Amino acid sequence: MMWRAALIPKRLFATSQEYWANKMKIAVIGQSMFGADTYNILRKNGHKVVGVFTIPDVGGKQDPLAVAASQDGVPVFKFKRWRLKGKPIPEVVEQYASCGAELNVMPFCSQFIPMNVIDHPKNGSIIYHPSILPKHRGASAINWTLMSGDKKAGFTIFWADDGLDTGPILLQRECDVKANDTVDDIYNRFLYPEGIKAMGEAVQLIADGKAPKIVQSEEGASYEGIMKHSTAEINWDQPAINLHNFIRGNDKVPGAWTVINDEKVTLFGSTVHRSKLPTGESVQVKGMAQPGIVHKNGLLLYGSDGKKINVKNIQYSDGKMVSASKFGQADASETLELTEEENGMMAKISTAWGGILNKEIDEETDFFKSGAGSMDVVRLVEEVKQGIAVVLKTEDVYMNTTFGAFIQKVIRVFRGLEVEEELDVDYAEKEVKGNMLQMPHQLFINNEFVDAANGDEYNTINPADESVICKVSKATIEDVDEAVEAAKEAFEVGPWSTMNPRDRGEMMFKLANLMEEHQEELAMIESIDSGAVYTLALKTHVGMSIQTFRYFAGWCDKIHGKTIPINQAHPNRNLTYTKREPIGVCAIVIPWNYPLMMLAWKMASCLAAGNTMVLKPAQVTPLTALKFAELVVKAGFPKGVINILPGAGSNIGQRMADHPDIRKLGFTGSTPIGKQIMKSAAVSNLKKVSLELGGKSPLIIFSDCDMDKAVRFGMSSVFFNKGENCIAAGRLFVEDSIHDEFVARIIEEIKKMKIGDPLSASTDHGPQNHKAHLDKLVEYCDVAVKEGATLTYGGKQCDMPGLYMMPTVITDVQDHMYVAKEESFGPIMVVSKFPDGDVEGVLKRANDTEYGLASGVFTKDISKALYVSDKLDAGTVFVNTYNKTDVASPFGGFKQSGFGKDLGEDALNEYLKTKAVTLEY
């Protein structure tokens, strides 16, 4: 009969009613920690476990399920078998039946249970199976999920019948399969924890009479045999991706094996190799068409399609596991003498081992031969982290299976003696002005430079002569997903999430120092890739980037909440405080006009706040971002914190806006694209957005200005960085009485400008960024003339090789004209007159735009200057200066120029969320 749990009042809402939950008598049949945790959740949910049926002790050690039940005083039965010669053993069945179970729950069971036991309870039996049935029926379901290259893994809880995993489905859950997931990865991340929860949910559905019985379809059904050592030999006559799936599908059990240099070895830690071809020692692999390569970061192996995989670890036939890079080498690691502190650490680790293995520990105790499984590995790594603050990887346990070897590993990590994998960089090299530039040109994901998933590349062009600098990997949607996955893992479980903020700041300072060491190299790369004049690139593009990282590095340990006085609920007292927390995985999409500086403006504040990120540089200017990525690794940033993907915005930029795991997107670019990003962000997951968009910044020059200063800054307001400047003065309003003199002096100054090679120290004006943009600038001038404006100077491409636009002045511009409303984003000065003394009139005209990024005013009258700056509707107002930005001053626009701030303390708010905590005491 159904029984009812003790009444526990549960007030859900003020108007809700208390209710009794249905509970059942349950027999748990199975084994392992999964069985034990299923047993625990059933008891926690109020069900009565009337009997536990598990396997006999192994080597004097009880199964975890037996241990859990024995501690609670629940009857435990350890049958060696349930059948003999194909028939149920009557006394076994009789002992089972005496428990009076209403439901059999079988979380993980290696024994064959007779049908008269399966059908005995009135509610039957339910079984957990680690695949999305009807796919992958059979005992090696997880292995086959990976070996088949499935994009989804999952589990099914089904009603047992007399078939093999064919019973009706009760519930299913699924998860994404990551590119390098192993059996342990999927099991520990999803199948185990979510499976336990689902077993509890399934039982409650049965108790409440709501459990479905969905007949399995035979469409798409598959049954695969048990994977064992004899079937796990690698067949090398298949594509690399299939080899990768086979190896990871058998990692760790039973282990995919092959013969290398006549020695049988098992392979672990496979990844598809998309980096440069490493150098190393050739080895002969049985059945593989060409030799493998033992190199500093592993063992490179080839598929039949010529593509490659890399294996990180190997295991010899005697059971010893080593780094694949050490294949064929003698073990030369020295035995470390322990200090007093380290002996204390060893004692704590010994206690952890003893607790897991339930036995006395000595140096020769083998973790796995003592009965430990994959969940025990996870537990050990966590206990070491909690107990002595040493962070290990699960593979460290597999490669150091005896207690003595494990202690040595822990001490080496503790002392900082472990050397991280070296960064492989396939440089594109180019000699520039006697300097050999070495430029990474691949995607940067998880601290590795890799080819795009589909191998696509494109040419990046030097605008000074339209020559090809190099080929650059072109990211795909698959690459975005991989990068987001790396960033998410770095944020949720990597060292970045637990790092002391001050240490995070030190890492950012180190990165800024490295940027400074490479400042000239970065400036040269920026110059050839974007057309920036080298001297400007050195000081502004790169120089301000360094300043930005240093500024925000100083903020890392100064981000905090506050305490808030609230009304007290007497006689109790309350404390309310806030916490400023990172958002999570952020996406950053930057433009091509200041490639490195735009990266720094957004990334530095994002990092200081504690986030991880995926950044997309502009497709036409990827090279400084990728060189910066190389410095990220040198600075010691953990894997996955920073990922950089060059490619098309319509493809990978859109995927970033749509991605459900990205929680914030920062974008600098055009207003139409900004609007599309907002739509996508809303539809996908309501991700936070900050936008720095187009502008048509007005500059008002009054007749009482300092004319020399107005001319000098008027020139830079338009022609700075070839006019490719988001805050460039898009329209100059010049008071009538000085208009003609101002324009004449501007033209006089333009004629003095040296246009040419951006790498020359004497050059004032370099090439426009790319051909399509240059063509639009020429068209912009043509439209102005057609609408009645006067082309006073320039208006065409320079008569010289390269993408050079003549500095241009357009006058007699009326408010209705296209050039009065839309920005050129180039070296084009658009000039309009306004009547003498008409302050209100010119303010109205200046504000009559949908943009509001920046603005400026020149006058010697301080009262007028303050009045005008108050009335100008823009995020930045310059008074008697222009382009004066600083890392400590917030930068951002109004209206359709976007929202959110870069730089200054305000920028941190774009990458933080506020949590309020109230407690009663």
Image: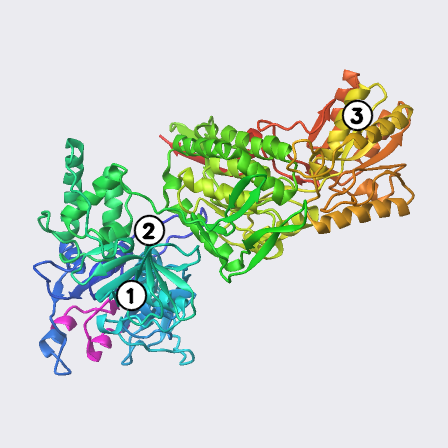
- Report the amino acid beneath label 2: Lys
Can the viewer see residue 447 in this picture? yes
Residue found at x 92% / y 43%? 788
Q: Which mark is residue 427?
A: none
- Report the amino acid beneath label 1: Gln
User: Comparing marks 2 and 1, which lies closer to the viewer?
Assistant: 1
Closer to the camera in the image, 57 or 222: 222
Circles 2 and 1: CB distance less than 8 Å?
no
User: Comparing marks 1 and 3, which lies closer to the viewer?
Assistant: 1
Task: Find disc 3 in the rendering and name its residue.
Answer: 711
Q: Is residue 119 above or below residue 503?
A: below
- Specify the quadrant that holds the N terminus: bottom left
Where is residue 591 drawn, in percent x and y? 63, 44
- The crowd level at tag 1 (other Cα within 10 Å; few <14, some 14-19, many 20+) is some
Of helix, strand and loop, which mostly describes the magenta segment?
A: loop
Task: Find disc 2 in the rendering and name its residue.
Answer: 296
Task: Find disc 1 in the rendering and name its residue.
Answer: 284
- Specify which label sits upstream in the sequence, 2 or 1: 1
- Report the amino acid beneath label 3: Val
- Distance between mark 2 and mark 1 Cα atoms: 18 Å
Where is residue 108 drawn, in percent x and y? 24, 66
- Can you tell which quarter of the image residue 269 is in? bottom left
Kind of element beneath mark 3? helix
Where is residue 8 drawn, in percent x and y? 31, 50
- Distance between mark 2 and mark 3 Cα atoms: 60 Å
